[in-house]
């Protein structure tokens, strides 16, 4: 049996900054008086430190969200095997591709895919909604450079998309005509001002000096956008934004340069998105900056290109979104080759999407560097190369998660063009499962508390002799009478993303609310994905629902 022991294994050098009062998160993690933390740039590639995995809270509250096994935070002891899962490509991919004349650049190069941008489910319209980068060649001719505008598409089911004629630019679905690179469209469900419900962090081109900056705009409907309300200083192109509801802060994921890689990431946060954008700029190495901190570089476990193994990998982009009790980070993991080699060999650069997970919004663990959404290097594939993540994803559709990604086809027009958009589906909570075979195994949590009443699990025990039972232990690791494994009504021959667990004569945990306990899961021939304690028999988790979905609460919380 493997035992996970709390211990602080590494001490990291910190740069003193202005202290603030410590903040304790929903899961018991204390952020400390120095936040965000400031780490020195490493001299050699290494994985990001994740202090809360080595110095856990003495007791972990589990009142917010489904509890996932993406790391060891919740686990005290187990002999189950952690299994990583990847989504299934939709058979009808791509769901959106360049088929309008205005989606080409002035050089005739087709583009129709989000460059982060956003795909969200909008409760007010009952539609899946997408914003994407497209060429603008026949709208604004410029033979010297490629022009990109922002277009809009919508869908009733997330699979079949239409490009409505909005007539903002006559006869097109263009919603913004500023020359752009990456962008973030964010549905802010907690915004009290309806005119600012949609937020647009656009990486716009500055013609006066041929550089990039963030311009923040607002919209009530996602179609009609305000003039810029805030602008940053000089920025690198591949920068995106996200909101962390656990700290109530807006954050920027900024491309930046370190000695290890010019595809590294820097970070800034603020409770006011306008102030955040106004304070943002490129980080100079020789300046200790109050607003911008170094975040991470590519680490020593990054994938390398099988045909160009000499190329040092980079992180092309990093998108983040809240899901249930955690933050999901999507890495656009780049492994080359460089643009000049791509042009010479007429191939696409290789980016794949891999995942990381955070319980504080800053430190991300990467339990595997394998591709979550991969390239498909077969002839004619829409995603032969340069696969990148999209903001707003995943969306929750019934028992499935909808991820979307952009990809590029091989073509004879221009090596880095012909972008399309594809859909990938995953079981709800299905990132990681704790697995047992024919021999029974078990998993014991750390000490936890809860204020709910009903225990739910997401598990698959549909195989022959598959079974899951749950025992509740007291602070001394002794089974609590009435909640032993022998009292538990086993989950058998079942595969459910939401299944209530009960005991003989005890359907709820009201007598254990507020007490310090541990859950011990016994599993045979099955997969355990998540657990949570809900305040009602309907099983809502009170966690965050990422990009939303049909029949979910319009607050963005599972209520």
Image: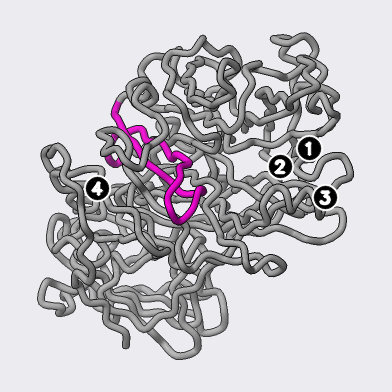
Would you name the residue on which mark 4 appears? 37
Residue at 26% from the left image edge and 68% from the top image edge: 505
For the residues carrying marks 3 and 1, which lies nearer the camera in this image?
A: 3
> Which of the marked residues, 2 or 3, is nearer the chain's N terminus?
3
Whole-number angstrom distance, CA of label 4 to CA of label 2: 36 Å
Q: Residues within 10 Å of mark 3 (few under 14, many from 20)?
A: many
Picture layout, residue 528 above or below residue 130? below
For the residues carrying marks 2 and 3, which lies nearer the camera in this image?
A: 3
Whole-number angstrom distance, CA of label 2 to CA of label 1: 6 Å
Would you name the residue on which mark 1 appears? 97
Whole-number angstrom distance, CA of label 1 to CA of label 4: 41 Å
Q: Identify the disc placed on residue 335.
A: none
> Which of the marked residues, 4 or 3, is nearer the chain's N terminus?
4
Per the rendered image, the range of residues in magenta is: 246-271
Picture layout, residue 213 above or below residue 450? above
Residue at 70% from the left image edge and 58% from the top image edge: 375
Would you name the residue on which mark 3 appears? 410
Q: Secondary structure at mark 1?
A: loop
Residue at 32% from the left image edge and 41% from the top image edge: 286
Disc 2, disc 1: CB below 8 Å?
yes
């Amino acid at each position: 049996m493997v035992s996970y022991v709390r211990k602080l294994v590494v001490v990291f050098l910190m740069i003193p900054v202005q202290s603030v009062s410590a903040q304790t998160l929903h899961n018991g993690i204390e952020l400390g008086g120095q936040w965000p933390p400031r780490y020195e740039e490493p001299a050699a590639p290494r994985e990001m430190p994740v202090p809360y995995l080595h110095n856990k809270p003495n007791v972990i509250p589990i009142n917010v969200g489904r509890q996932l096994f993406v790391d060891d935070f919740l686990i005290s002891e187990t002999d189950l095997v952690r299994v990583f899962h990847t989504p299934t490509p939709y058979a009808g991919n791509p769901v959106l591709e360049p088929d309008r004349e205005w989606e080409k650049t002035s050089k005739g190069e087709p583009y129709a895919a989000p460059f982060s941008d956003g795909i969200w489910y909008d409760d007010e319209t009952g539609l899946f909604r997408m914003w994407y980068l497209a060429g603008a060649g026949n709208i604004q001719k410029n033979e010297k450079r490629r022009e990109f505008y922002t277009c809009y598409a919508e869908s009733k089911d997330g699979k079949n998309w239409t490009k409505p004629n909005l007539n903002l630019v006559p006869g097109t679905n263009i919603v913004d005509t500023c020359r752009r690179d990456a962008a973030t469209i964010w549905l802010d469900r907690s915004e009290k001002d309806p005119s600012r419900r949609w937020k647009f962090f656009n990486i716009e081109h500055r013609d006066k000096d041929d550089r990039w900056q963030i311009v923040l705009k607002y919209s009530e409907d996602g179609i009609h956008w305000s003039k810029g309300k805030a602008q940053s200083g000089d920025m690198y192109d591949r920068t995106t934004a996200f909101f962390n509801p656990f700290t109530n802060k807006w954050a920027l994921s900024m491309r930046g340069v370190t000695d290890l890689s010019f595809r590294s990431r820097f970070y800034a946060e603020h409770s006011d998105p306008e102030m955040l954008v106004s304070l943002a700029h490129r980080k100079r190495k020789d300046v200790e900056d109050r607003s911008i901190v170094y975040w991470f570089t590519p680490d020593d476990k990054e994938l390398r290109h099988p045909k160009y193994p000499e190329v040092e990998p980079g992180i092309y982009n990093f998108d983040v979104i809240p899901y249930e009790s955690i933050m999901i980070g999507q890495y656009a993991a780049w492994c080359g080759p460089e643009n000049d080699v791509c042009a010479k060999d007429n191939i696409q650069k290789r980016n794949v999407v891999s995942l990381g997970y955070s319980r504080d919004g800053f430190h991300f663990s990467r339990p595997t560097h394998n591709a979550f959404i991969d390239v498909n290097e077969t002839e004619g594939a829409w995603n032969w190369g340069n696969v990148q993540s999209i903001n707003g994803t995943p969306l929750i559709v019934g028992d499935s998660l909808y991820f979307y990604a952009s990809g590029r086809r091989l073509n004879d027009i221009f090596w880095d063009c012909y972008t399309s958009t594809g859909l990938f589906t995953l079981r709800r909570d299905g990132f990681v499962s704790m697995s047992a075979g024919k021999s029974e195994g078990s998993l014991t949590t750390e000490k936890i508390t809860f204020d709910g009443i009903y225990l739910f699990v997401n598990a698959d025990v549909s195989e022959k002799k598959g079974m899951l039972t749950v025992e509740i232990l007291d602070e001394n690791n002794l089974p609590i009478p009435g909640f032993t494994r022998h009292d538990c009504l086993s989950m058998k021959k079942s595969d459910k993303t939401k299944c209530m667990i009960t005991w003989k004569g005890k359907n709820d945990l009201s007598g254990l609310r507020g007490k310090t306990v541990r859950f011990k899961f016994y599993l045979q021939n099955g997969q355990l994905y998540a657990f949570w304690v809900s305040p009602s028999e309907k099983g809502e988790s009170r966690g965050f629902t990422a990009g939303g979905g049909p029949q979910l609460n319009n607050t963005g919380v599972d209520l």
